[in-house]
Image (cartoon, rainbow, N blue to C red):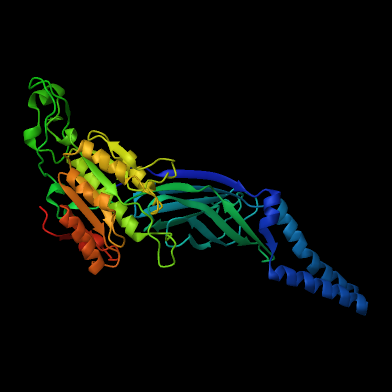
Amino acid sequence: MSKRANTAPNTAGSTAAIAPDDAAARLRPTPRGWALFAFGLVLIAAGEFFGLATLRYVGLAFAILPPIVYLLRLLFPPKLELERTVYPTTVAAGDRLRVVAELRNRSVIGVEASAYADVVTGAAARSVGGVLPAIASRLHPREGRRRRRIAYGLSGLRRGIQHVGPLNLEHLDGFGLTRAVQQIGEAVEIEVWPHLHDVDRLDVPALRTGAEVDVAQGRSGEADDVITREYRRGDAMRRVHWRASARAGELRVRQEEHHSEVVAMVVVDSRAFPDAQGTAPLVDDGFELAVSAAASVLKRLHELGYDTEAFATHPTPDADGALLDGVRTPADQGLGAIMRRYMLVLTGDAEDAGEIGAIVDRAMRVGSGPLVYVGRTDQPAEAIAIDLAVAGSPPIAVLVTPGGLDAAATKEAERFAAAGWQVVTMNADARDPWATAARVGGAA
């Protein structure tokens, strides 16, 4: 189950013609051009030595051809217009998107067959490349010859803000004497949200669709003095306020009888875990799985009608300068803002004290709602984090186990279970980590 907030295409068009200074930096003679120039000089010298004027003229023609071609390409570079479409521009990590780029020649000079490389960030490969057929000049009578199309699919993008573009184009002149490299178009931004999964696979009763939780009303007034909201899929029919529905002409649900009175908290352990060399890895699969699990659980709690608060134990300013430090999402609002925070959340320095103390204080003040802690087993959790169990109703721990559920991971999971947590483990190294979800301990 993946989350797409925006499936509208994003089209970025730009006209790129290399300025003279840029062209000089990106235009180079080929080995063939140098060889032809040197061969011409040799023929000129031989003509002088043997007194053969014809040989001198032939050598002169060979020698001046490469400089002439170079100057012509320098003064009249190709004028290529790029129109790029990427759809969708908001995807979940691992989902597929499609890129279509169309090149059109606005110059009177055609462009020979070219090698292209479209720059991509956040993917296994740093670019997507191929060979583009020749593009005719704008004077060519056939429209199809004046433009070329590049289309490809991308999948497996990593969480975060990624980019497609610019397009690098490398082409020779018709004689093969010079090589030009053009960078065309602007980068298109892609938002890659955490992949959202079906939380039912965690086998936690409190997180199942349609789960009922006793909620304190906390409101007063007559039966008709209620706050209602629109009916959403999964709402129990007994929650429908029929009088308000009749007035509104659509199904309305009693707000005070749903979970919005209770705050559910989701805490993700954001400590940076160094590798064997003592440095934090560029891509931490364990943390990526933890973020995916936290976002998936928060989405389910939101569907069940809870107001939610999201925390990171070691919040670090993200690309927007924001922190995941108790971001609240009311039950009647969308998830766009919090999913952007999860998209951008970073790990923090494990040696810092973090905000776990403040999270405990907040949990103790709010209380009465589900509290979900998403952590890892390759480093012991802080004792104060395990003590969060007293504030959750119920407390649920989702523990990511890089390397599988070995003895150390089992011991860590049992620490949580002994403190009253409902514990679920997932193997971060598995092909499908969610298929490895397993309950540990007997907490109810």
**What percent of the width, then of the height, locates residue 119?**
50, 56
> Hey, which quadrant is residue 341 in on the image?
top left
Residue at screen point 91% across, 75% down: 48
**What percent of the width, then of the height, locates residue 403?**
29, 67
**420, 228: nearer the viewer:** 420
**What percent of the width, then of the height, locates residue 1?**
24, 52
> Hey, which quadrant is residue 30 in on the image?
bottom right
Residue at screen point 29% across, 42% down: 359
Q: Is residue 209 left or right of residue 322?
A: left
**257, 215: nearer the viewer:** 215
Q: Is residue 253 left or right of residue 174?
A: left
Residue at screen point 68% across, 58% down: 27
Residue 2 appearing in the image = no
Q: Is residue 158 above or below residue 252?
A: below
**What percent of the width, then of the height, locates residue 207?**
16, 48
Task: Give the farthest residue toward the bottom.
Answer: 50
Task: Give the farthest residue toward the right.
Answer: 51
Residue 302 appearing in the image = yes
Q: Is residue 51 left or right of residue 331?
A: right
